[in-house]
Image (cartoon, rainbow, N blue to C red):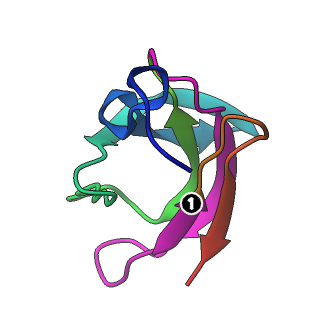
Amino acid sequence: MATSNSSRLEDVAIVIRKVHGGRPGRIVGYSAINNGSYSVDMGDLPAGKYLIQVDPGGSMYMTGERLVDYPGRSGSVRQNWTLSTGRTALPTLQ
């Protein structure tokens, strides 16, 4: 898909929220998309459930989200997202 001013990746962000009692809590991390990639430094966040969300900002891309079990500092969770202007963003765990 050709990228136009209305569907720019530069406007999209990845937002991380800690999940408490089955509900999303405050934002604990975020990353812009640069050159088609993103990386969120979870730093000293404890192991547990986190909600990963695609925030389309002012772009025409659609939002998406996925609940992940973060293993803590000893590990990481890698995801690829397929973004679209016609359907919800789809994550794939690696």
- Image point (35%, 27%), residue name: 11
Q: Is residue 94 above or below residue 68?
A: below
In the depicted structure, whether residue 65 falls above or below residue 11: below
As for residue 41 lying within the magenta part, the answer is no
Residue 21 shown left or right of residue 69 in the figure: right
Q: Is 77 within the magenta?
A: yes
Q: Residue at x 46, y 66 (%)?
A: 47
Q: Residue furthest top?
A: 58
Q: Position of residue 68 (x, y in %)?
A: 62, 62
| Frontmost residue, 15 versus 68 | 15
Asked if 83 appears above or below 76 in the picture, the reply is above
Q: Quadrant of residue 39?
A: bottom left
Where does the image place residue 61, in percent across and percent down from the top left? 59, 32
User: Is residue 21 rendered to the left or right of residue 79?
Assistant: right
Where disc 1 sits, the SS reads strand
Q: Quadrant of residue 65?
A: top right
How many numbered marks appear?
1
Examine the image and state in which quarter residue 10 appears: top left
**Mark 1: amino acid:** Trp
Magenta-tinted stretch: 58-81
Q: Quadrant of the C terminus?
A: bottom right
Residue 61 drawn above or below residue 45 = above
Give how far across and how far down residue 34 sits, in percent. Answer: 23, 50
- Which residue corresponds to mark 1? 81
Instruction: Tell which of 10 and 79 is nearer to you.
Output: 10
> Between 66 and 84, which is closer to the camera in this rendering?
84
Image location (x, y in percent) of residue 28: 35, 37
Nearer to me, 18 or 9: 9
What crowding class fits label 1: few (fewer than 14 Cα within 10 Å), some (14-19), or many (20 or more)? some
Judged left or right of residue 25, residue 74 is: left
* Residue appearing at x 28%, y 74% in the figure: 73
**Residue name at image x 38 percent, y 71 percent:** 72
